[in-house]
Amino acid sequence: MAPNRRDFLKVSGLAGLATLSGQVVAGDRNRPKMTQGQNPSAKNPRQFNMSGYSAPALEKVRIGVIGLGNRGPGAVVRLSKIEGVELKALCDLRPERVEYTKERIKETHQQPESYAGDEEVWKKVCERDDIDLIYIATPWHLHTPMALYAMQHGKHAAVEVPAAVTLEECWQLVETSESTKKHCMMLENTCYDFFELLTLNMARQGFFGEIIHGEGAYIHDLIESNFEKDRYWDMWRLKQNRRNGSLYPTHGLGPIAQVMNINRGDLMDYLVSVSSADFMMANKAKELAESDDFYAGYARGSFRGNMNNTTIKTKKGRTILIQHDVTSPRPYSRLHIVSGTKAYAQKYPEPGKISLGHDGFISESELQELEKQYQPPIVQRIGELAKQIGGHGGMDFLMDWRLIDCLRNGIPLDQDVYDAAAWSSIGPLSEQSVANRSASVDIPDFTRGAWQMNAPVDIELSKGGTTPILTS
């Protein structure tokens, strides 16, 4: 059984965000590197290899959606437009959010049941016998408990980013997915952005040569929204910003990890992480507290550094730089850089560009020719439809459609539980590094050695896959 919400809040440390387990006193330069053996769960042998696993095909994918705040309603609308989907249940603590979401799909054939008004009501959705997939779009600290409970009750789990906020949770997801043989996919939508899919296909076909280095980022000025009342339930996102590290690494990391075949031929080995001081968050809290007692508690204590740089080394000697900054007045950027022995690609803060040498980027017409040559099948097939339906320019719909396509055809998912765990682990591991003067910290091998034999992600579409339809 998964821990209840109150127990989990104590474990995750949201009430004050307690010191990380395994963290040592800052300044201890003789500290040994953190290893996966220091985590009790890591000692358990692999029960089953979920990489490349094909679950039994589902003629219909019956879905329960939990969490209808910021991301959930849009997901429900997108899922309602995919053939073979049955929305069986919509769940949120607030009844008005359920009703709002149902109103958005009232013109479709979907007739989901409503679940609301109780902190434990989501469990009833997971316990239903007529649901195949639990789609989780709740605050971060609830992602792992809900995904665990879903898998323990025979459901596949699709969970928003990050899938976990502690290292222990990462291992719990891995071991539960293996023991139940249920998929646990982190909904990392940036892997389905058009330029990221293009560079992945180019890398697969050798365009970049050997991949040397990659970069990714989440640079997004959210300081006003993080402090805005009722923007995030119970101010959960502001509370998460008490942690000091790379708190939201997966948007930048996911596409680079796939290009580098992480967990499928290469493995993230260790990281070092550096955070700036906080020049903005605490000052904002104190400013608001002067005129509103609501913010008095947030004006006490510290927040994360405004800018975090985390550098990762892989087993094969590649490097990855991940940046996180959600306070500075910088242009929005999900920096995507792929650097190889033959070519270089970059997107953000400018549009996607390709370079073949130090003379600079190729022309727009040359880039268009490359896009035609290397456009992946999923974009060729439903790219224009995805743009029409939307969700961050269409990448959200591509992600949802691909998930349903895989489940209906019984083929492996593009992102498995090892990706969910490894990518999410950068958050807590970066906190450990920052707290210890940026000492190196080992990244666990969540595959327990299987990365050396796992096949790369197959970006081809399944034969006879599902056809998305626009409902009237």
Image: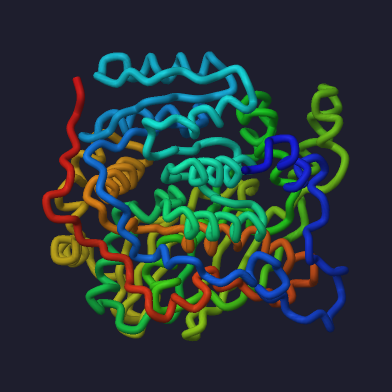
Q: At 54% across and 64% down in the image, what residue appears?
A: 422
* Residue 446 percent coordinates (x, y): 54, 68
- State the quadrant of the C terminus: top left
Name the residue at 50% across, 37% down: 137
User: Residue 189: where, in percent of width, then height?
Assistant: 40, 49
Give left or right: position of 50 versus 164: left
Q: Quadrant of residue 377?
A: bottom left
Q: Is residue 30 left or right of residue 113?
A: right
Relative to 132, is 242 on the left or the right? right
Which residue is more in the foreground, 130 or 305?
130
Q: Residue at x 62, y 43 (%)?
A: 1
Residue 368 percent across, percent down from the top left: 18, 60
In the image, is residue 283 above or below residue 373? above
**Viewer-side residue, 437 vs 45:** 45
Measured along the vertical axis of the image, is residue 222 above or below residue 25?
A: above
* Quadrant of the rendered image containing residue 202: bottom left
Nearer to us in this view, 216 or 80: 80
Q: How is the image coloured?
A: rainbow
Residue situated in front as seen by the camera: 249 or 105: 105
Quick check: 435 left or right of 418?
right
Q: Residue at x 22, y 75 (%)?
A: 205
Task: Count numbered badges in the picture.
Answer: 0
Q: Residue lying farthest left?
A: 464
Residue 277: % across, % down: 77, 57
